Amino acid sequence: MQWQDDAIILGVKRHGETSVIAELMTRTRGRYLGLVRSGRSRSMQPVLQPGNRVDVTWRARLDDHLGEFRIEPLQLRAAQLMETATAVYGVQAMAALLRLLPERDPHPHLFEALDVILDNLTDPADAGELFVRFELAVLDDLGFGLDLKECAATGLRSDLVYVSPKTGRAVCRTAGAPYADRMLALPPFLSAEHSKAADSESLAAAFRLTAHFLNRHVYEPRGLNENSTRDGFVQAALKALDKAG
């Protein structure tokens, strides 16, 4: 068995004296693990860093085997990702999100989104908003997508300011007003009727929104704790956005 694909390094683990088990997000085959022989060598260590985009060839005798990777660099951006806290935490937090998905389950749109976000993690104006949209995409692929296009009560597509914490559906101002203290805020930048970029207040509300549904539908049912790198990214993104503003 053999295939070739573009991939992004998510992480590595030592295996024996000289090799590693590499975890990749591939373009067409989802998250994959494979053995990289001599992966701890001086030439391979800079390549096998989280965030780098690589060309990978996978080989195994049978399809369900771990298999071996042969990896060639395409875009080495790990050094740049070490320059800011948003990037350092961001690449780890997105890798943790992708680990919520089944291994070898194709999600090509998430690969594309990851690739774009990694190129923008050092920009505080974009990093937080892109990360929130990535979380929403992961929730959608897990079967818990939010419906933010129209009011759950009236069907209106305007003045959407709330999200029901139970259903994940948007609610307009009039319909949600009597229950405002129990509703989650819908940040304007996530509403189809607004094109304004996120500020620190709306970004913080967006982080609370996605955290609620990740905890409700994913972490708590699986007995998992929220990954600490997400908290680090949230704090770094908000701090960077406040400083930039």
Image (cartoon, grey):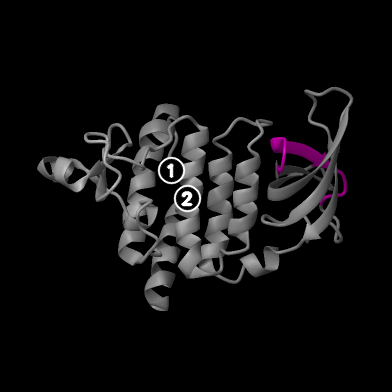
Which image quadrant is residue 178 in? top left
x and y, in percent, of residue 82 in the image = 62, 67
Q: Residues within 10 Å of mark 1 (few under 14, many from 20)?
A: some
x and y, in percent, of residue 220 in the image = 39, 32
Q: Residue furthest bottom?
A: 244
x and y, in percent, of residue 128 in the image = 46, 60
Foreground mark, 1 or 2, reads 2
Q: Which residue is at the front of the view, 100 or 127?
A: 127
Q: Which residues are magenta?
A: 26-39
Label 1 belongs to which residue?
A: 226
- The residue positioned 47% from the left and 29% from the top of the image is 143
Q: Regarding mark 2 in the picture, which secondary structure is present there?
A: helix
Asked whether the viewer can see residue 178, the reply is yes
Q: Is residue 155 left or right of residue 190?
A: left
- The residue positioned 58% from the left and 55% from the top of the image is 91
Q: Which mark is residue 133?
A: 2
